[in-house]
Amino acid sequence: DLAEIVHFFQEKLGRNAEIGLHGESLGAATTIASLKDVQNVSFAVADCGFSDIENVLEEIWRYSHIPTAIGPVMNQYAKLHFGIPISAMRPIDSLAKNQVPILFIHGEDDQYILPANSERMYEATKGKRDLLLVPKAGHAESVFVNKSLYTEKLKDFLSSLAS
């Protein structure tokens, strides 16, 4: 659990330690969803995360021609193995009251998790936030396609938090 990991580092480094979270793809969704459960996190970076899993699955089913009848089966599987239905996997819901600064990053050519997911989460965030859409980058490729743009935006975002 991410909240437990953050707590561990806070205990080791002290309560005043600057702790940031960075997640990519499912890790980005986990980072966003956990912000409501963690305390004293200074910032988060969400690279190509999904806003809600149902939208992502609908896109995958549409492109891969998987029968939509598999949806209820997956929902039951999620309930049995994870204790929550797929419909509850909505990181965007944790953003309405969020005050942790977030940098959203997404490849413009991501066909797996569409950039609209990061755009929706950016709009839903009430706290300090920024958004970088990386041209010609597919899923989880932004840092590799344009490392200088990625690192420059990250540096600018972190610098903006210090002022």
Image (spheres, grey):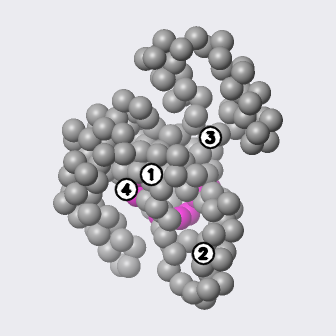
Give the number of the disc on residue 146.
none
Q: Which residue is mark 4?
A: 130
* Residue under label 1: 24
Callout in the foreground (3, 1): 1
Q: CA distance from mark 2 to mark 4?
A: 20 Å
Q: Alpha-carbon distance for marks 1 and 4?
A: 16 Å
The quadrant of the rendering that contains the N terminus is bottom right
> Which mark is first along the chain, 1 or 2?
1
Residue 136 visible? The answer is: yes
Where in the figure is residue 104, as x and y percent of width and height?
A: 40, 52
Q: Which residues are magenta?
A: 97-104
Identify which residue is drawn at 56% across, 71% down. 41
Give the vertical position of 102 relative to 105 (above or below). below
The three-letter amino acid code for the residue at tag 1 is Glu
Disc 2 marks a residue whose amino acid type is Asn
Task: Identify the residue at image location x=70%, y=38%.
Answer: 88
- Write down the residue under mark 3: 90
Is residue 126 left or right of 2 when viewed as pictured? left
Q: Is residue 51 left or right of residue 82?
A: left
Q: CA distance from mark 3 to mark 4?
A: 20 Å
Amino acid type at mark 4: Asp
Report x, y in % for residue 33. 61, 52
- Element carrying mark 4: strand
Precedes in sequence: disc 3 or disc 1: 1
Q: Secondary structure at mark 1?
A: strand
Q: Please, what secondary structure does the residue beneath circle 3 have?
A: loop
Give the mark nearer the N terminus: 3 vs 4: 3
Task: Estimate the spatial distance between the alpha carbons at disc 3 and disc 1, rounded to whole Å.
Answer: 16 Å
Question: Which numbered circle lies on residue 40?
Answer: 2
Q: CA distance from mark 2 to mark 1?
A: 21 Å
**Neighbours of disc 3 within 10 Å: few (<14), some (14-19), many (20+):** some
